Amino acid sequence: RRSSDLICKLTGGFSLATSTYAKLHKYQRHCVAWLWDLFNKEPGGILGDDMGLGKTVQMSAFLASAARCGALTHVLLAVPVSLMDNWEKELGVWPPRLAVRRYHGSSRAKALDKTVRDGGVLMTTYGTVTTSAEALSVRPWDYVVLDEGHKVKNPSAKVSKAMRSLRAHRRMLLTGTPVQNNLKELWALFDYA
């Protein structure tokens, strides 16, 4: 076997390709192992970390590895428009490379159909989810991941209602500001997850 095909065992039967393991800092490996542990317990979670410490890296490495071992096939990823290119690039770094399709702009129906049929990551924006929640509810997602997840801190806002209407087996929030201004906002994040 090629060295990139070798596997590093982490925890609870979860493993990373050695090429992935080598690219992660020690704290990122711990986070990926934590994501796997949380995934197996079937709740949602909040990955709250300072900006620049690699929330996107950690989640991308986890999603690729979980897909490799067959734990998930259909992921919905909601991100701000300004981060779509970065997420697409990061998801392409980790083996195996997941099929990433954008549900934004004119080719939405085609991207959704292909993802529902073949699996992969359907990446969209909060605004698009707000206007297309019904179409995105065509299936229960293995994982719904929200980058800048604090956007759902107001449960009565349209975006929060739309995100909550999506069927998902598990939900994950990524945010640089997990501690909110008041307990109601913090509870809204826990409640979503």
Image (spheres, helix red, strand yellow):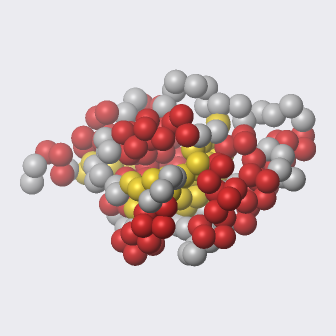
Residue appearing at x 37%, y 33% in the figure? 24
The quarter of the rendered structure image containing the N terminus is: bottom left
Q: Nearer the viewer, residue 127 or 142?
A: 127
Residue positioned 57% across, 75% down in the render = 138
- Residue drawn at (67%, 43%), measured in percent from left and top? 149
**Camera-side residue of 4 and 86:** 86
Find residue 105 and report its horizontal and vertical position in percent.
50, 52
Q: Residue at 49% x, 61% y: name it.
A: 108
Quadrant in the picture for residue 100 = bottom left
Q: Is residue 18 above or below residue 39?
A: above
Quadrant for the C terminus in the image: bottom right
Residue sticking out furthest to the left: 1
Q: Which x, y percent locates residue 142? A: 53, 66
Residue 57 visible from this viewpoint: no
Asked if residue 16 lies left or right of residue 122, the reply is: left
Near-viewer residue (19 or 153) = 153
Count of numbered badges drawn on the protein: 0
In this rendering, would 172 be left or right of 154?
left
- Nearer to me, 72 or 2: 72
Q: Is residue 63 above or below residue 186?
A: below
Rendered view: 39 above or below 50? below
Residue 121 coordinates in the image, percent (x, y): 44, 57
Residue 103 at least partly seen: yes
